[in-house]
Image (cartoon, rainbow, N blue to C red):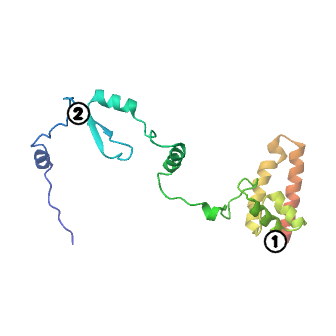
Amino acid sequence: MTRRRKKIDLDELLAEAGTRDPEPLRCEHPGCEQAGGFRAPRSTARLRDYLWLCLDHVRAYNAQWNYYADMDEDAVEEDRRATAYWHRPTWPLNGGRIAHGIRDPFGFFETEDDEKRRRKTELPDSPYTQALAIMDLTPPVTPDAIKRRYKELVKQHHPDANGGDKQAEERLKAINQAYATLTQSTGP
């Protein structure tokens, strides 16, 4: 079942709205008789309450306006920080620590506690962990992830892609050895 909407006659609406001319606002500056076509906030505490001023008086008002005039240095800094996120509440990501799954190979976001925890959980040096380090992978790894990462590294470090560079050749040898180690340990 469909409803039929009442037809709206736009000409009638426009005629009703335009039947009376609104009274033009006068400039609120004492002694001024010009039209007040420009708005300005009354104070820093009442930013949405406006004065209506003429062009000359709004220019003078803007020249002397200073939002931070009555604030000390700490209040100015607090307001600037709150303005950066539109005065909305914020909270640290994952309780102040970087969420799992974000790669941070250089440890930029690592705290001392994170570093200690990482050292405790590091596996002892073995061919498997060395291969993971060469391939820049973290356990647990799947055969598909190993293969995908191997292809990326071969494209990046192949000597033909690096103008026959000997160092690239050595890096590729290490990558091939790491790939062989990882594929043997994870199975088919």
Location of residue 60 by image quarter: top left
What residue lies at 77% left-to-right and 49% top-to-bottom?
156
Relative to the observer, which residue lies in front, 77 or 21? 77
Amino acid type of disc 1? Thr
Q: Which residue is tagged 2? A: 27
Relative to the observer, which residue lies in front, 73 or 182? 73
Residue 80 position within the rendered picture, expressed as x and y whole percent measured from the top left: 51, 45
Q: Is residue 132 shown above or below 75?
A: below
Query: 10 Å neighbourhood of mark 2: few (<14), some, or many (≥20)?
Result: many
| Alpha carbon distance from label 2 to label 1 | 81 Å
Q: On the rendered structure, is 37 left or right of 174?
A: left
Residue 64 position within the rendered picture, expressed as x and y whole percent measured from the top left: 39, 31
Residue farthest toward the left in the current orientation of the protein: 19
Q: Secondary structure at mark 1?
A: helix
The residue mark sitting in front, 2 or 1, is: 2
Query: 10 Å neighbourhood of mark 1: few (<14), some, or many (≥20)?
Result: few
Which label was assigned to residue 19? none
Q: On the rendered structure, is 182 left or right of 3?
A: right
Relative to the observer, which residue lies in front, 46 or 119? 46
Quarter of the picture holding the C terminus: bottom right
Quarter of the picture holding the N terminus: bottom left
What residue lies at 17% left-to-right and 62% top-to-bottom?
5
Q: On the rendered structure, is 132 left or right of 80?
A: right
Q: Is residue 62 shown above or below 2?
A: above
Q: Which residue is tagged 1? A: 186
User: Dots 2 and 1: beta carbons under 8 Å?
Assistant: no
N-term mark: 2 or 1: 2
What residue lies at 86% left-to-right and 46% top-to-bottom?
168
Residue 4 position within the rendered picture, expressed as x and y whole percent measured from the top left: 17, 65
Residue farthest toward the top in the current orientation of the protein: 56
Location of residue 160 by image quarter: top right
Residue 50 position within the rendered picture, expressed as x and y whole percent measured from the top left: 29, 42
